[in-house]
Amino acid sequence: MAKAENKNRVLLDFEKPLAELYQKLDKLLALQKSGKMDMSEEIKMLEKRIENTRREIFSNLTPIEIVQVARFLQRPTTLEYINMIFEDFVELHGDRNFADDPALVAGLAKLDGRSVVVLGHQKGHSTKENLARNFGMANPEGYRKALRVMRLAERYGKPIISFIDTPGAYPGIGAEERGQAEAIAKNLREMAELTVPFIAVITGEGGSGGALGIAMGNRVLMMEFAIYSVISPEGCASILFRDATRAKEAAVNMKITAKDLYELGVIDEIIKEPIGGAHQNPELAAKNIKSAIIKHLEPLLSLSHRELIADRYQKYRKMGIFKEE
Amino acid sequence: MSIHDWFKRKKLQKETEYTHERLDIPGNLWVKCYKCKQTLFAKDLENNLKVCPKCNYHFKLTAKERIKQLTENDSFKEIDASLISVNFLNFRDTKDYGDRIKETMLKSGLKEAIVTGFAKIGEIEVALGIMDFSFMGGSMGSVVGEKFTRLVEAALEKKVPVVVVSTSGGARMQESIMSLMQMAKTCAALGRLRENGIPYISVLTDPTTGGVSASYAMLGDINIAEPGALIGFAGPRVIEQTIRQKLPAGFQRAEYLLEHGMVDIVCERKKLKETLLKILRFFRD
């Protein structure tokens, strides 16, 4: 519990109005603790006020603020979600080719008793953890591990659930030498052909090809404060506006929020987050994800292999807006 | 941006001038090779398939030039020429995307960054897609993805092999998420082609990076690269900035990819047609 309280206190930039209220709350708590006065009523009221202020702030976030929430260090990671949503998780490692990629985790699990294969990008909560996980930026071996476990799922007829949270596929020398482009491209082609139900959940950052490389589900669900885009707002600003400081503007133009993507038909459902974002109440966030997964998985379970492939093909075949003269 | 990059950009700008302005203007007799700096007789360069006779530098080709080099006379029949990009996000960077499309159309004489159709290479009919870097850096938006997908679907129906010559900086940022979705769409179509046993030959030319390399360009049954072509997932500048190291010599060039097992063949432009034909005949017979 102490840890959860701590998490509340790490404020996002735009949550600054809460800092003062928390200071007041601390004073009241100290008074209460000293036993000199009964402040429980006041504490309750102030806590309510903090919640209301937070709700108000979060009901009106700008795209660049949503980017901050999506990238927040406190945001629950894939392994945390896996442990909250599934039972009997057994992590699997390695692409059987080159290495194990700690930036992309995968394994066997049970979803309310049903065997499923789960996978996703793994970030950390601290610099140390993030260095170990390469900030959730997978190398080719990560994408090949993902494909290996998806194939495993297919062989045994188990549904696949993927969690997307990455700034992008890793742009490094080794990644290029080992075929980052080929690894992602092959995943796209193979995901289209999978004969089992596949649900992708964008939980944090959906960074370009690195995200899509494990996200070609029959259904794509997205958390309320997650983002999904072809390039980061900073990257877009620096290339197109020739000015990296115009990321705020780029974030608006690019339409990267769950609401925008739902309107564009790219995602199938927006998963509601707790007030103040998933990190404020990871258990509730996980619960919401779980019910969304079950709701979308259920109708897919009765489809034949052929129907599942056709369903996926139609979903992506429709993507694109143009005119024909 | 480092000074190094600035010079690189200058060089790149110059090269574009040579390929797309100077070379196309009749009466411009002399051209300087961007790589070896030798002054070349423009006619010699044209006759050499736009490959520098002195240093073998492969100049960029327009779609029109590529079609002429690879296919039998008048055999190319274009399909889906009427697909046009629209600024559906009201995207605006330094310019409105809609205006940018119009200007690029005028400047390049093209309607999009890929031309698709059916043609004959030797005696063999193929579904042919040719990308053109002069149309917004060959970037892939909805139209490129759609034309590629329709080409593959048409090839499936006609049961003819697919040959696509790629050159692209990657996904078209002005179409944001929709350009990313084109990667999924095109690869799904290639999955169908594969299931049906129809061959797909991918020719990667300078440069092929980002969303196009990470989708259809890398998925050939056979991948062929032109000498010296820059091919990769991330651009060299992004990698340098991420790892804060100098990149090894020849990094991400066609020969480097061959060495690392990512392409089957590095093929000189003058041998490209005969190589394609050998491969096509292999699949036919």
Image (cartoon, coloured by chain):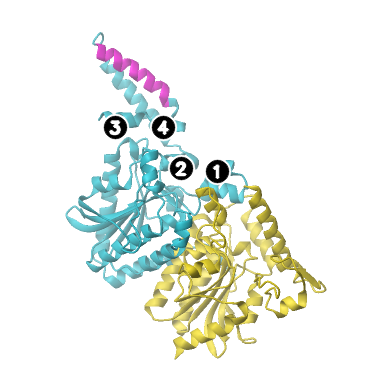
Chain colours: A cyan, B yellow
Whether the magenta-drawn stretch holds residue A30 is answered as: yes
Q: Which mark is residue A247?
A: 1
Give me the chain letter of mark 2.
A
Q: What element does badge 2 sit on? A: helix
List the residue tagged with mark 2.
A67
Q: How many marks?
A: 4
- Tell which circle, 2 or 3, labels the residue nearer the N-terminal end: 3
Image coordinates of residue A140 in percent, x first then y, are 40, 59
Q: Nearer the viewer, residue A187 or B129?
A: A187
Residues marked 2 and 1 touching at CB (< 8 Å): yes
Give, as a single range, the part of the protein colored magenta.
A18-34
Q: What element does badge 4 sit on? A: helix
Whether the magenta-drawn stretch holds residue A93 is answered as: no
Amino acid type assigned to the residue bearing label 1 in the image: Ala
- Tell which circle, 4 or 3, labels the residue nearer the N-terminal end: 3
Residue A215 visible (yes or no): no
Q: Residue at x 67, y 51 (%)?
A: B6
Residue B137 visible (yes or no): yes
Q: Which mark is residue A323?
A: none
Residues beneath discs 4 and 3 located on the same chain? yes
CA separation, marks 2 and 1?
A: 10 Å
Q: Nearer the viewer, residue B161 or A298?
A: B161
Q: Which mark is residue A4?
A: 3
Residues beneath discs 3 and 1 located on the same chain? yes
Q: Is residue A157 above or below residue B153?
A: above
Residues marked 2 and 4 touching at CB (< 8 Å): no
Give me the chain letter of mark 1.
A
Amino acid type assigned to the residue bearing label 3 in the image: Ala
- Tell which circle, 2 or 1, labels the residue nearer the N-terminal end: 2
